Amino acid sequence: MTNGKKNGFSTAVKELETLCKNWVEQPPLVVEAAVVTIVNGVQGALIRKIFDTIGFRIASAYSVTPSQLKPPHWINARNTGVLIGAKMGIKCVMKKVRGKEDSQTRMIAGFGAGVLFSLVCGDPPAVVIMSGVMFALVGEGYFKVKEKLTARN
């Protein structure tokens, strides 16, 4: 390979690297929201499945009667994945659209996640709305407590 071809190839690689870096730093909102939702949903489902499995193994080691002990199902993991993925995806979109993360952003994300969680669980409409409200209030309450505790330290 001649020196001119090497420099041309090197320049093309650097341009491609810069282009990719810029795209990763500023991805389109739809792509960012999809990635955040999928990654957090899968992570939440896997963590739930791991904890369910560990709990099942511990409980079975302590001779819990078989009627009380059921092996963990993927349904619980799916529901947790939906809850976490939806919350993080909605929060990502709201943060981008509004330019900040505040109480309103967190409450909207909590409400949306609660509604989707209830819909996936097959709850009736009244419960779906109440779950959304509960998740919004609990999520915001948790954040406020955490905020006050970190301010003290």
Image (cartoon, helix red, strand yellow):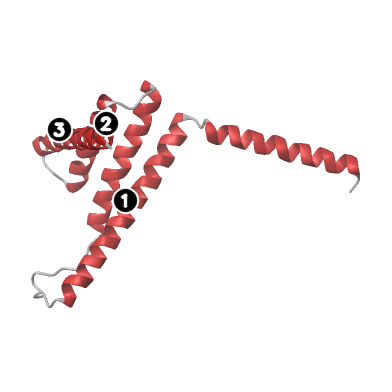
Task: Report the residue at 57% width, 33% height from top.
Answer: 23
Q: Are marks 1 and 3 in contact (CB under 8 Å)?
A: no
Specify the farthest residue to the front: 153
Instruction: Count the marks.
Output: 3
Dot 2 and dot 3 residues touching (CB under 8 Å)? no
Tag 1 or tag 2, which sits nearer the N-term?
1
- Please identify, in this view, whether the residue under mark 2 or under mark 3 is nearer the observer: 2
Amino acid under label 3? Val
Q: Residue furthest right?
A: 2
Left or right side of 26 for 77: left
Instruction: Give the image location of residue 24, x and y in percent.
Output: 54, 36
> For the C terminus, which image quadrant?
top left
Say which quarter of the image contains residue 90: top left
Q: Is residue 72 above or below residue 147?
A: below
Q: Residue at x 33, y 38 (%)?
A: 88
Residue identified by numbered label 1: 44
Quick one: SS at disc 2? Answer: helix
Give neighbour class at mark 2: few <14, some 14-19, many 20+ (Cα, 10 Å): many
- Judge from the rendering whether residue 8 lies leftward or rightward of residue 147; answer left or right: right
Q: CA distance from mark 2 to mark 1?
A: 18 Å
**Please, is residue 88 above or below residue 97 in the view?**
below
The x and y percentages for residue 139 are: 21, 36
Q: Which mark is residue 106?
A: 2
Which amino acid lies under the numbered mark 1 shown in the image of this protein?
Gly
Q: Quadrant of residue 138?
A: top left
Query: Which amino acid lies under the numbered mark 2 shown in the image of this protein?
Result: Arg
Residue 133, label in figure: 3
Which circle's residue, 1 or 3, is located before the other in the chain?
1
User: Left or right: where does residue 113 sit relative to residue 5?
Assistant: left
SS label for mark 1: helix
